[in-house]
Image (tube, rainbow, N blue to C red):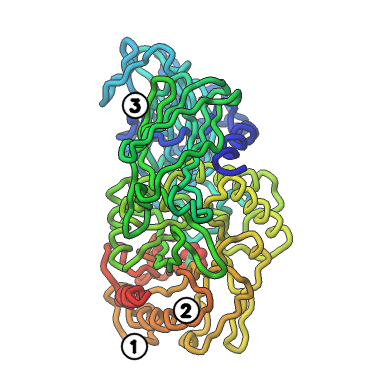
Amino acid sequence: MNIRTLIIAVMGTMLPSMAAAETLPVIQNVNAYESLSLNGEWNYIVDVQEEGYYDYRMKPTPWGFFRNAKPQKPEDLIEYDFDKSPTMQIPGDWNTQDERLFFYEGTVWFMRKWKVESGKWKENTEGTQEVGKRTLLYFGAVNYDCRVWVNGQEAGHHIGGFTPFNFDVTDMLKEGENTVIVKVDNKRHAEDVPTLSFDWWNYGGITRDVKLVKVAPVYLEDYSLTLEKVKGEKGKKVREICFSAKLNKAEAGHKVVVFIPELKLEKTFTTDAEGKIQNSMFSVQSKKLSLWSPENPKLYKIHLSVDSETITDEIGFRTIETRDKQILLNGQPIFLKGISIHDEKANGGGRANSTEDAHQLLSWAKELGCNFVRLAHYPHNEYMVREAERMGILVWSEVPVYWTIAWTNPATFENAQQQLTEMIHRDHNRANIIIWSIANETPHSAERDNFLGRLAQYARSLDDTRLISMAMEVTGASNYVNRLNDNMNQYVDVVSFNQYIGWYRDVNDAPKMTWEIPYNKPVIVSEFGGGAKYGYHGEKNQRWTEEFQENLYRENTAMLDKIDGLAGTTPWILKDFRSPRRVLAGIQDYYNMKGLVSDKGEKKKAFFVLQQWYETK
Ligand code: GCU
């Protein structure tokens, strides 16, 4: 079983226990459907003590803000009014839009209205409420704990700040004015994913697109098209493409057509009793098929139709695998010239959430000579992944199982599993994603191994067409010999680790260092680096100067060249980014300064050291 069959099975079984019953599996390729965007100005109410949800006995109250109540009689007491409350731009975090909320962690309520007239949506696009069609309310992401009401009825609940979710709200809609109210809480808890401490800003709010999506009563909940690896000589002439799909209904006999105009390929499939098509192969002549790669980010327009409804997607075909210590893209060894990135706009702009934001960050990565990015430490917005795919940039995508997670808490495991499911579900048709990462810098213990071992196997059960990894830590270093010894090596395809020689330890000792990595697997150094303030100059042994960072990169890249099996690296990090853990006044000022470019995009000297090194790769 693999992504082509299992995702759907798991989604169906797992979610009910996690969220309110009406949560549906996330619709695949949401941007392909007719929709009404609810992006724009939303009213908001900051509710530090969750007055709008709990009564003074901290019991959920039926008179909460979700009712959007208005005084009916002069003596009526209603102590909130969304219409008179300030507004902010959605999608967007609250921290960079209201300076009172810069450090805020707690509850904020949001309200948005739209009109439906004679079945027609009335806002900024013409949408019709055709008979039988369903309306899904879709959120790209909300950090962290999100409750949603439509016209006072609870639509659902979702936790996890970096993955999409949707609710069927068809039966909650009414003629005239409709209201959606969202309670968002980004308070941190030990049992959460991520847990209490993490080195990035805990941007709160509705941070990605919100839209009403119109779907037919029976629609494609998920589908996948993947290229089989070459098997034998025949495989060289004819390539096998594997198609799987799942409808939102377990109904047999529905016709699903896959049409690839450029390849003059049209295939018709029929769903089984579960409303699925599983691992159906069709072939295409190799010479006709242009494979996706950084040099040739070829995407094919694909039309998929169920009964009479047709959606379009753009999909690339490639294979990714390992052979001993090599990573093979389309059967050829590749060195991953990477950089780590946070999902944050430049120029202090908060959470990134557009193609423009993505293009700016990825253009700097391209200038570095990168063919690969590590999207740290959580699934980034879909625009980032799709723009990287168009720009020919390979991707490492990760769930925020970061540092000291509550390993023995079953709800924490389910939460991590759900985020992993939603990440893979959203992006499993993206050719540029080659690595799913299940964790970062997690302390060794039997409980951790048990948690991560299960999570790795689960990830592989969802998708065995990609590589599984995680960012490990160097466990032993003495006499300049660095050893990697991590039980998780047995679960991953690529052995990746973070090391900070020259910054957190062994300053200027990188040239003396050697490495013992006792695993016959490709190695990725998923983090190395040091901080510098752009424009601050001095001796190379002076912390925070560009010269210190430049020297650190020189010494580290030379050291990495000595690592046997090094198949790639993603230095920490492309751009200075906000973190509440970075409080050094005059230098950090709540920014992690390990960027190769400043938050304004100013290139530090180390930028050019890495650029030159990648020219040699
Ligand atoms: C860690 C961690 C990053 C962090 C970085 C740093 O390795 O994975 O999230 O920002 O080190 O200390 O700068």
Kindly identify the amino acid type of the residue bearing the numbered disc 1. Answer: Glu
Pick the front one: 328 or 357: 328
Is 104 left, or right, of 251 in this rendering? left
- Which quarter of the figure is the C terminus placed in? bottom left
Residue 12 visible in the shown view: yes
The kind of residue tagged 2 is Leu
As measured in the structure, the alpha-carbon distance from the residue carrying label 1 to the one carrying label 2 is 24 Å
| Position of residue 183 in the picture relative to residue 94 (left or right) | right
Residue 268, how many percent across, how many down? 45, 28
At x 46%, y 52%, the residue is 202
**Callout 3 environment at 10 Å: few (<14), some (14 to 19), or many (20+)?**
some
- Relative to 104, is 131 above or below? above
Residue that label 1 marks: 539
Alpha-carbon distance for marks 1 and 3? Answer: 58 Å
Mark 2 residue's CB less than 8 Å from ligand 1? no
Q: Earlier in the sequence, mark 1 or mark 3?
A: 3
Is there any visible trace of residue 98 in the rendered image?
A: no
Foreground pick, 70 / 508: 508
